[in-house]
Amino acid sequence: MNRTPQRQHAGRPPASILQYNTGKSPTAFQVMQAAIPDTDANILLVQEPPLLAGTPPNLDDFQCFPSHKQACWTVTYVRKKGFKSTSVISDPYPDFLVVSLKLHSKDREPPTISIANYYNRLQNCNWRTRDQPTHSLDTLFHEIFALTDLVAGDRNKHHPR
């Protein structure tokens, strides 16, 4: 679990971000939920959320932005009263599984922050050889991350075999 406070600018609400990979576990998701009051997070970046009938859990005080309606591997939650508006800046990518958002504190103002939350799924998962993510980081940076201020997610690059 990572928490990233952002600098507060005059007239803009602070972005307090909680990032968590729940590994599709409802228990891990509940642990993350329990941490929300302590962190005062207004943005939640979740990778591998638990799904019920293909849908990530609903959180009462948050808007939910899943990466994909049929195959949700990442979801971004934005506190309803935390920002004036939230706009999606990228269409769901079927294989990047990314949500890119711009969060605005006031109408007709520059965005407070723009965020990419992604899951780079494995193309080939073999424990005897090296796991193969679907995309290189170079592809992700050029096609998605150049549009955003903050990038969080699961790159699936931690299998060093």
Image (cartoon, rainbow, N blue to C red):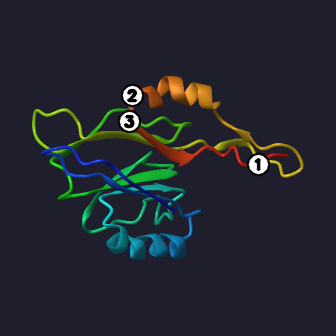
Q: Are marks 2 and 1 in contact (CB under 8 Å)?
A: no
In the picture of the structure, the residue carrying the numbered disc 3 is: 149
The three-letter code of the residue at mark 1 reads His
Asked if marks 1 and 3 touch (Cβ < 8 Å), the reply is no
> In the displayed structure, does residue 128 sit left or right of residue 59?
right
Q: Is residue 123 above or below residue 33?
A: above
Give the side of residue 84 with respect to residue 90, left or right: left
Q: Position of residue 33 (x, y in %)?
A: 40, 72
Q: Earlier in the sequence, mark 2 or mark 1?
A: 2
Q: Position of residue 115 (x, y in %)?
A: 38, 41
For the point 55% across and 30% down, the residue is 140
Label 2 belongs to which residue? Answer: 147
As drawn, the label of residue 143 is none
Q: Nearer the viewer, residue 96 or 108?
A: 108
Q: Based on the displayed image, in which of its 4 quarters is residue 95 positioned?
A: top right
In screen coordinates, is 46 left or right of 87?
right
Residue at 26% of width from left, 69% of height from top? 60
* Residue at point 39%, 33% (across, down): 148
Label 1: element kind: loop
Which badge, 1 or 3, is on the more N-terminal residue? 3
Relative vertical location of residue 33 with respect to residue 20 in this rendering, above or below: below
Identify which residue, 51 or 61, lies in the foreground: 61
Distance of label 1 from label 3 (alpha carbons): 27 Å
Residue that protrudes farthest toward the left in the picture: 107
Work out how far the residue at label 2 is from the one at label 1, CA to CA, in angstroms: 28 Å
Residue of label 1:
159
- Amino acid type at circle 2 is Leu
Residue 35 occupies quadrant: bottom left
